[in-house]
Image (cartoon, rainbow, N blue to C red):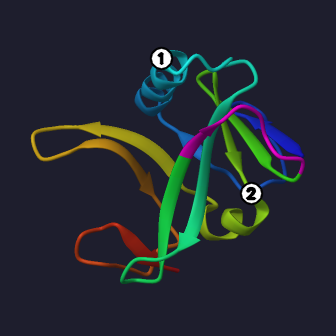
């Protein structure tokens, strides 16, 4: 398990989290009665969607042994090794607007996305 903080320099690929996304995720974690000092948001990639891959997110009570852990604005983000190669360099943001509200991954590795933006290809 490796850990990287927002201000720490590590050889691991970076995953960033905006302050807005971290605040919203922490609110949701607390609503679900998770211990935010140990629990976190799992960000992963799975097969699916019309472009081949899609993002997944869920809350986990603790990281797995082989996860890379990122800490931004007091939020812990867990990423498994298989997903990391697809999302390294990404930024997790939270958007709120008239059309939609929710978490959004800005991924520099994407070469194409489906029309609805729910799946991608690297």
* Residue 24: in magenta span: no
Gap between marks 2 and 1 measured at Cα: 25 Å
Residue lying furthest front:
32
Residue identifier under label 2? 80
Question: Mark 2 or mark 1: which comes first in sequence?
Answer: 1
The residue depicted at 47 percent of the width and 77 percent of the height is: 48
Magenta residues span: 58-65
Q: Residues within 10 Å of mark 1 (few under 14, many from 20)?
A: few
Q: In the rendered view, tell whether residue 73 sits above or below residue 59.
A: above
Q: In the rendered view, tell whether residue 25 sits above or below residue 63.
A: above
Q: Quadrant of residue 20?
A: top left
Q: Quadrant of residue 113?
A: bottom left
Q: Give left or right: position of 5 versus 119.
A: right
Q: Give left or right: position of 73 versus 68.
A: left
* Residue 59: in magenta span: yes
Q: In the rendered view, tell whether residue 68 sits above or below residue 118.
A: above
Contact (CB < 8 A) between labels 2 and 1? Answer: no
Q: Give left or right: position of 111 versus 50.
A: right
Residue identifier under label 1? 31
The residue depicted at 87 percent of the width and 45 percent of the height is: 2
Label 2 sits on a secondary structure element that is: loop
Q: Position of residue 25 (x, y in %)?
A: 49, 29
Query: Mark 2 against mark 1, which lies toward the viewer?
Result: 1
Q: Give left or right: position of 115 versus 65.
A: left
Label 1 sits on a secondary structure element that is: helix
Q: Position of residue 35 (x, y in %)?
A: 68, 17
Image mark for residue 20: none
The residue depicted at 16 percent of the width and 38 percent of the height is: 97
Magenta stretch, main secondary structure class? loop
């Amino acid at each position: 398990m490796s850990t990287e903080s927002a201000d720490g320099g590590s050889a691991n690929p970076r995953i960033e989290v905006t302050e807005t996304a971290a605040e919203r995720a922490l609110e949701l974690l607390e609503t679900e009665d998770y211990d935010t000092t140990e629990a976190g948001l799992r960000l992963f990639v799975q097969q699916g969607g019309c472009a081949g891959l899609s993002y997944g997110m869920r809350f986990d009570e603790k990281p797995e042994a082989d996860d890379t852990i990122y800490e931004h604005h007091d939020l812990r983000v867990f990423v498994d090794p298989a997903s990391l190669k697809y999302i390294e360099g990404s930024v997790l943001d939270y958007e709120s607007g008239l059309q939609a509200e929710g978490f959004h991954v800005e991924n520099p590795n994407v070469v194409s996305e489906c029309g609805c933006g729910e799946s991608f290809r690297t």
